[in-house]
Amino acid sequence: MSMTQHFRRLLWPAILTLVSLGLVLFPSRLTGLVGDDETLLLAVTALAYFSTAWFASRIAAFVLDQTAARRRPYPRLLKDMVAALLFLIAFVATVSLYMGQGALGALAGSGLVLALLGFAIRNVVADTLSGVALGVEGPFRIGDWVDIDGLARGKAIEIGWRTTRLLTLDRTYMILPNSQIARQRITNYSAPKPEYRAQVRITLDHSMPIGRAAQVMLAALKAAKLILQDPALDVRVLSYEEGGITYALRFWISRFDRDADCRDEVFTVVDEALRRAGTIAPYRRIEVIPRAIPDDA
């Protein structure tokens, strides 16, 4: 959102806040216009509460947008949560203003009703509270590629009060309840930076020495076009067993949506290089040892 749009969004809340606060701070001007009407004075005070909450919520949204311009964008849920909290404070202040000390008694008397209502909508409440927790903790933000263990993998496009919406690599639209997300392990492939290191495993026969195999595969990786060449690529030995030598080819990917294409390219170029070098993958060998037959048989 541009600075002009932010200014327009702040204009009317600022005007209303200044006018209402002016009437509250200088009640003589109001009484001079409409007389000594206590109900009208209370209404103006309530208006000052809500207009101040409105103005403060717009200021908070402006600050979050300016911070997100230099970092990753904050979810809309966080802005909604700040606005809801400010308006709740204004509402409680207004109720206390009209009811005085009786407000606490009225709220306490409705506790049983609230408990029954909470039990009826407990799933909605669980999703909402989980959404608040996701907004505060920020394990991922809009635009991040995430893997929610056991549920889905995709790009976060919206984080709401009850649900989070993901766009998968297959371009399918998934809507997940926040309470389910909060109970799962979350892997964020876009934080703290969009690039990350991946690896593939390749097992080769013992016929090729480790140094030669690493040299051939590393040269193949350096010829790849999709993976990043900086940070440096490397090849490591993971295991040396009877069935073959297993290598880990470690490389960097610029962003998660290129993961499948990068792995495909890595396997393709390495396979071509190994075939040119004459090596083969390990295979099961069966050696037949003839049984010696005694001479007197």
Image (tube, helix red, strand yellow):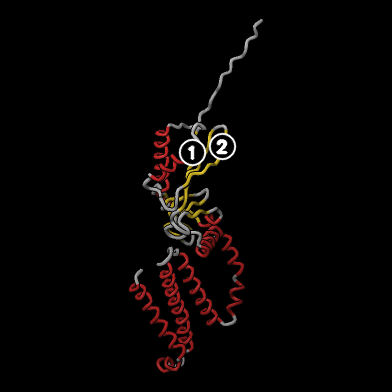
- Looking at the image, which residue is at 41% across and 44% down? 221
Q: In which quarter of the image is residue 217?
A: top left
- Looking at the image, which residue is at 58% across and 78% down? 103
Q: Looking at this view, is 64 or 100 the one in front?
A: 64
- Pick the quarter of the image with the C terminus: top right
* Label whose residue precedes the other's in the sequence (2 or 1): 1
Q: Quadrant of residue 4?
A: bottom left
- Looking at the image, which residue is at 42% across and 93% down? 29
Q: Looking at this view, is 161 or 40 the one in front?
A: 161
As shown in the figure, which amino acid type bears the numbered disc 1?
Answer: Ile
Q: Residues within 10 Å of mark 1 (few under 14, many from 20)?
A: some
Is disc 2 in contact with disc 1, using a CB cutoff of under 8 Å?
no
Q: Where is residue 9 in the image (x, y as percent from the top left)?
A: 37, 74
Q: Where is residue 88 in the image (x, y as percent from the top left)?
A: 51, 73
Q: Which residue lies furthest to the right in this view?
A: 296
Which residue, given by chain and number where applicable, does mark 1 sit on? Answer: 202
SS under mark 1: strand
Q: Residues within 10 Å of mark 2 (few under 14, many from 20)?
A: some
Closer to the eye: label 2 or 1: 2
Q: Which residue lies furthest to the left in this view?
A: 4
Can residue 274 be seen here? The reply is yes
In the image, residue 260 above or below residue 144:
above
Q: Where is residue 275 in the image (x, y as percent from the top left)?
A: 41, 33
SS under mark 2: strand
C-alpha distance separating marks 2 and 1: 12 Å
Q: Position of residue 279 (x, y in %)?
A: 45, 32
- Pick the quarter of the image with the N terminus: bottom left
As shown in the figure, which amino acid type bears the numbered disc 2?
Answer: Tyr
Which residue, given by chain and number where applicable, does mark 2 sit on? Answer: 240
Q: Looking at this view, is 76 or 230 the one in front?
A: 230
Q: Residue 281 carries which label?
A: none
In the image, residue 168 above or below residue 246:
below
